[in-house]
Image (cartoon, rainbow, N blue to C red):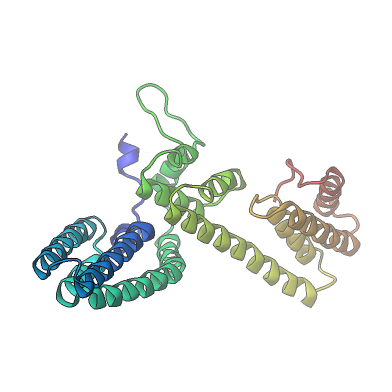
């Protein structure tokens, strides 16, 4: 348990959680219902079907109800969208309600477009925060399920974290995968992509995209190095290993896996051509060919 408390620190999920956007559907329903009620009340007043005193009383009661809902949302998500709706409705009736509803729609749309950037910035800060010290690495291995405590200790694997309702714990699990990814953890990302919480799905998509980008950047760098030194077996061998690693990562679909395997095989052929007697080059080429023949990545081949 002391290891659990001495692990590496987080760059911080606080700012991200503090910017939580209220649920779009409840806010939209409250805004739309308020507009409809105010418009109906105004029509009733104009047509004379509701006395002015009754119309004013209903208007005040509706404003108070919206205000109470606004305070509840403000406490839970720190969003003042419904507060503005309550104030505009109380002061300007149906016109204020319609204006506030339009502003709420624009605000929610803008927040939805910005959520990927928010997760991306938070994840960048988390990934680049600092390297793990020995205690931090040991704690991550424990949480990932690579090590187990016997006796009184117990650690939940990352996959089990996604089965609960703790959003912060899910964010932490995905951030750990982003920091120290291993192909054996790819199933956790894919499970998070189907999570019931939209914010978890967005973060999982961000983690997946960033890991894919890391692989493609490495491959592009090695491709440039191999092109500059076509006679270098080491450069071609490094490129073949990188492409094979991407194929085995679990981050891409079956069609792209085969594409990467074929490209890895071509790079391995170049390495063998440059150094016919190289044992590592021939072993890697054979492993890639076996993977292509089996229709998937070679499970026993090392990067």
Q: In the figure, is residue 220 to the left or right of 129?
A: right
Q: In the figure, is residue 170 to the left or right of 251?
A: left
Q: For the point 40% across and 39% down, which residue is it?
A: 164
Pick the front one: 62 or 179: 62
Q: In the figure, is residue 188 to the left or right of 131?
A: right
Task: Measuring from the top left, give residue 47's x and y in whole percent.
Answer: 23, 73
Q: For the point 30% across and 75% down, which residue is it?
A: 98
Pick the front one: 162 or 243: 162
Task: Measuring from the top left, give residue 89's x and y in whole percent.
Answer: 20, 71
Q: For the point 41% across and 42% down, which residue is it?
A: 139
Which of the 4 quarters of the picture holds residue 83? bottom left
Number of marks present in the image shown: 0
Residue 292 in view, yes or no:
yes
The correct choice, above or below, for 278 with respect to 40 in the image is above
Task: Measuring from the top left, give residue 152's x and y in whole percent.
Answer: 35, 23
Task: Measuring from the top left, give residue 62's x and y in whole percent.
Answer: 18, 62
Q: Quadrant of the N terminus?
A: top left
Q: For the point 43% across and 57% down, which residue is it?
A: 131
Pick the front one: 163 or 186: 163
């Amino acid at each position: 348990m002391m290891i659990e408390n001495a692990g590496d620190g987080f760059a911080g999920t606080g700012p991200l959680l503090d910017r939580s956007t209220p649920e779009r559907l409840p806010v939209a329903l409250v805004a739309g219902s308020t507009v409809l009620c105010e418009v109906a009340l105004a029509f009733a007043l104009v047509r004379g079907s509701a006395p002015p005193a009754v119309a004013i009383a209903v208007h005040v009661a509706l404003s108070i109800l919206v205000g109470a809902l606004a305070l509840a949302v403000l406490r839970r998500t720190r969003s003042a969208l419904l507060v503005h709706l309550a104030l505009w409705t109380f002061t300007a009736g149906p016109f204020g309600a319609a204006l506030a509803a339009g502003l709420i729609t624009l605000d929610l749309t803008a927040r939805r477009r910005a959520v990927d950037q928010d997760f991306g910035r938070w994840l960048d800060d988390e990934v680049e925060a600092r390297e793990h010290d020995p205690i931090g690495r040991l704690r991550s291995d424990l949480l990932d399920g690579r090590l187990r405590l016997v006796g009184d200790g117990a650690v939940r694997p990352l996959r089990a974290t996604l089965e609960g309702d703790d959003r912060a714990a899910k964010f932490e699990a995905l951030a750990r995968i982003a920091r120290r990814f291993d192909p054996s953890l790819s199933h956790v990302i894919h499970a998070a992509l189907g999570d019931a919480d939209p914010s978890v799905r967005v973060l999982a998509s961000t983690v997946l995209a960033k890991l894919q980008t890391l692989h493609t950047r490495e491959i592009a760098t090695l491709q440039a190095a191999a092109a500059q030194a076509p006679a270098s077996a080491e450069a071609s061998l490094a490129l073949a290993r990188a492409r094979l690693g991407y194929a085995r990562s679990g981050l891409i679909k079956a069609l792209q896996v085969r594409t990467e395997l074929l490209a890895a095989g071509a790079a391995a052929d170049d390495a063998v051509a440059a150094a016919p007697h190289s044992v590592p080059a021939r072993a890697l080429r054979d492993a890639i060919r076996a993977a292509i023949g089996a229709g998937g990545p070679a499970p026993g081949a090392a990067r």
